[in-house]
Amino acid sequence: MDNSATFRDRLLSGERLIGSYIKTPSAIVTEILSLTELDCLCIDAEHAPFDRLQIDGSIAMARATSMPIFVRVPVASPHHILNALDCGATGVVAPHIRNVAEAEALARACQYGAGGRGYAGSSRAARYTTRAMHEHLTASAAQTTVIAQIEDLEAVDNIAAIAAVPGIDALFVGRADLTVAYGASSQDDPQVVAAVERICAVAVEHGRRVGMFVARPGDVPFWVARGANLFLLGSDHSFLLQGAAQLIRDCQ
């Protein structure tokens, strides 16, 4: 790996990247996971009880250990996106991007410029006024990673148009929500698998990267072969549960 490459460089190059979710609002948990060989972490502010100060503390700890860190924002609003990026997040995972208008709004909210992200030189992202404006704008444009989560039937119907939106770096498949949307009882339902395969194929056709969660790590090679290269697997919660279960097994 090129140590000078940003996470966005690595993602766009097609390198296989493995990360995990953080679901406990704790800078200490983030610090511990930042000491692992994971490629990135993702704060799950959509489904876990993070407020802005907790997001800020977790991002600060990840940055102190040079661990790329994303925020899956509660909703894809400019307010939540600005909060995450000003705190210094590597980028955002935006849930429920369903059409071109929402994808364009996401891309615009993640970047500076007319109608986009508001500028403040006092943020952590701008190094608390110690980074010149032009330097910060240049670095932000090059490094901010924009990931649109695809998890609705409308999004699947509009996938080609969404994938074509400039400024979207990757499509992230929300397979559990797609399973619910299709009325299926399993993420292995053929209709769900076919939808994920279509998302992958369209993303590759438009030069976009693909990320996803899979319940079984052994499925990663299957999806790598179909164009995916970012996998957010497990979480601090699952690591605790699995560790405790393994401890009991080891003592029997």
Image: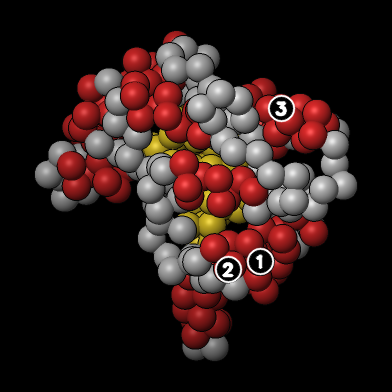
Q: Residue 136, which numbered label?
A: none
Earlier in the chain: of badge 3 and badge 2, it is 2
Where is residue 103, by image quadrant?
top left
Question: Mark 1: which amino acid?
Answer: Gly
Dots 1, 2 in contact, CB < 8 A: yes
Residue annotated with mark 2: 54
Q: Is residue 14 above or below residue 71?
A: above
x%, y% of residue 182? 15, 39
Residue annotated with mark 3: 142
Q: Is residue 12 visible?
A: yes
Residue extending farthest to the bottom is: 251
At horizontal 42% and vertical 65% (from top left) the residue drawn is 48
Question: Mark 2: which amino acid?
Answer: Gln
Secondary element at tag 3: helix
Residue annotated with mark 1: 57
Crowd tier of the residue under label 2, counting other residues whose Cα lies within 10 Å: few below 14, some 14–19, many 20 or above: some
Question: Mark 3: which amino acid?
Answer: Ala
Secondary element at tag 1: helix
